[in-house]
Amino acid sequence: MIYLDHHAATPMVAAAVRAMADAGDRAWANPSSVHGAGRAARALLETARGQVAAALGAAPANVVLTSGGTEACNLGVRGLLGLDGSSGRVLVSALEHPAVRATAESAGEVTVLPVCAADLDQAEAALANLAPGDVLAVQWVNHETGVVLPVSAWAQRARERGARVFVDATQAFGKWPLQLESSPFDAVAVTGQKVGAPAGTGALWIRRGHDLVPVLTGGAQERGRRAGTPSVLAQVGFGAACEALADSSDWLARAGALRDRLERHAIALGGRVNGVPLPRVESVTQVAFPGQRSDLLVAALDVEGVCASAGAACSSGLTEPVRSLLSLHPDEPWRAVASVRFSLGPSTTVDDIEGACVALGQVVARASGAP
């Protein structure tokens, strides 16, 4: 099997597996309990929080541990909208993951920030309309195309207008070092399953001084910002995976070279790379094949032993067009139903890419009716 769906989930790293095995007989208790077993679990949880915070360039007290990226995004967007002085208005980019877009639509008055591959001037114009109390909610790295948005510059513009800024960094985390305490952001969401931690882990960094309005109520956990007993064992794995990020800092450059090899082959087969010419993270490519269907290509690749995707795993099984591509390439709407995403991780090898190239060639040839 060739696994090229790391933007959906990546295998657990050895450090996380070891840490969870070592903590198994101490992580079962409720960390809110005051007895010895509870204190032992609490110590594990706080160690994990510190490891996550270090990877974020953040103070541990400002990190809320969550059940994943979706919860962190919900908490970030809804939490900022619930702050004193909020206007209830949210500006979201046209590329947003449903965890941000749908949350914003259900919680506030939404305006869409246009993002076109050919021109970002429209986005700049939309930012100029932000007002005090508004929320700008944008992703750092697009989960489908890998397009890297200029979130720091946009955040500075938003803050100049008195708006608050939420950043979905679930696909940026682990790609480069973060220093959130010195950033222009107010809240940032990350997830563990993209960095070698178990699924069901994530975090929200919230700037100190923001009295975050919780989404989950009924308990005082996480300093009153997120009710519910956490999975201590899963968070132990998250912390260990975050600590291991420092030892894998060179993988992105290697992935970029492999990604470029795959792209060249896909282009030779008639594919068109989505998101070009905007900056893209090196670990992913999404390629559109004229006249083809995304779901059929992905299914055919699976038969050949290649794990790829048509878009976000959270939307798998849906046949509607990929919304972000309608914004990025408005003159070529066919891309939204004819694209395949290949995302690489630290474990991706040259042999994986060579095998994927062979399989892709066979699949495209069959789909095109070639003998």
Image (cartoon, rainbow, N blue to C red):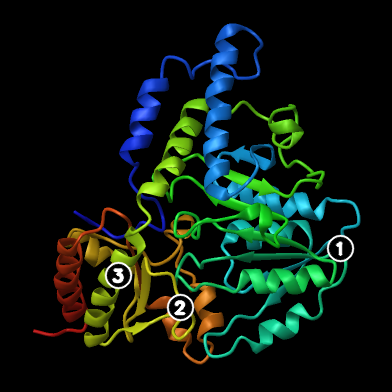
User: From the viewer's perspective, is 363 left or right of 45?
Assistant: left
Residue 203 shows in the view: yes
Q: Amino acid at mark 1?
A: Gly
Secondary structure under tag 1 reads loop
Instruction: Answer left or right for 298 relative to 365.
Output: right
Residue 295, position as x, y percentages in the image: 34, 68
User: Residue beneath label 3, please?
Assistant: 296
Residue 224 at x, y percent in the picture: 76, 32
Quadrant the C terminus occupies? bottom left
Residue 125 picture quarter:
bottom right
Mark 3, other Cα within 10 Å: few <14 / some 14–19 / many ≥20 = some
The residue tagged 1 is 133
- Name the N-terminal-most of marks 3 and 1: 1
Residue at the outermost top position: 35
Q: Residue at x 55, y 10 (%)?
A: 37
Instruction: Tell me the CA gap for discs 3 and 1.
Output: 45 Å
Q: Quadrant of residue 310?
A: bottom left
